[in-house]
Amino acid sequence: MDEDEIANRLLALEHGEFHFPTLYGKGWNRLYIGDKVKIGREFLNAVRKGKFPGIEDTGRKKGGGRVYLKRG
């Protein structure tokens, strides 16, 4: 999944908190753990660099994953 596809999925996402695997979708559970870590880290870094306006890293983990926030 590239940044444009992620941006499109973020547009369709409701405001509020979310985990990246929810955004990624069905294929997440078929990925190898190393790929999950790599892709998740890339998303975190992109969010921190401001590549996805309105999306924030809350700095918290809950339910086994990092929590992000889509502001309304």
Image (cartoon, helix red, strand yellow):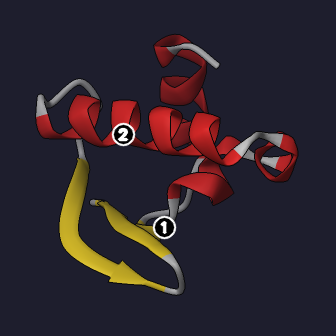
* Label disc, if present, on residue 41 of the rendered structure: 2
Work out whether 42 lies above or below 23: above
Q: Classify 10 Å Cα crowding around label 2: few (below 14), some (14-19), many (20 and above).
A: few
Work out whether 13 lies above or below 24: below
Q: Quadrant of the C terminus?
A: bottom left
Q: Amino acid at mark 1?
A: Phe
Q: Amino acid at mark 2?
A: Arg
| Helix, strand or loop under label 2 | helix
User: Residue pushed farthest left?
Assistant: 49
| Helix, strand or loop under label 1 | strand
Q: Residue at x 34, y 62 (%)?
A: 68
Q: Residue at x 30, y 43 (%)?
A: 44
Which quadrant of the figure has residue 12? top right
Work out whether 52 lies above or below 2: below
Q: CA distance from mark 2 to mark 1?
A: 15 Å
Which of these two is toward me, 19 or 55?
19
Q: Is residue 47 left or right of residue 27?
A: left
Which of these two is toward me, 36 or 57?
36
Q: Is residue 31 left or right of residue 19?
A: right
Question: Mark 2 or 1, which is nearer the eye?
Answer: 2
- Give residue 24's position: percent from left, percent from top: 67, 43
Work out whether 41 lies above or below 50: below
* Label disc, if present, on residue 69 of the rendered structure: none
* Label disc, if present, on residue 18 of the rendered structure: 1
> Can residue 53 be seen at all in this image of the molecule?
no
Q: Quadrant of the N terminus?
A: top right
Q: Residue at x 51, y 13 (%)?
A: 4
- Give residue 23's position: percent from left, percent from top: 62, 49
> Can residue 10 be seen at all in this image of the molecule?
yes
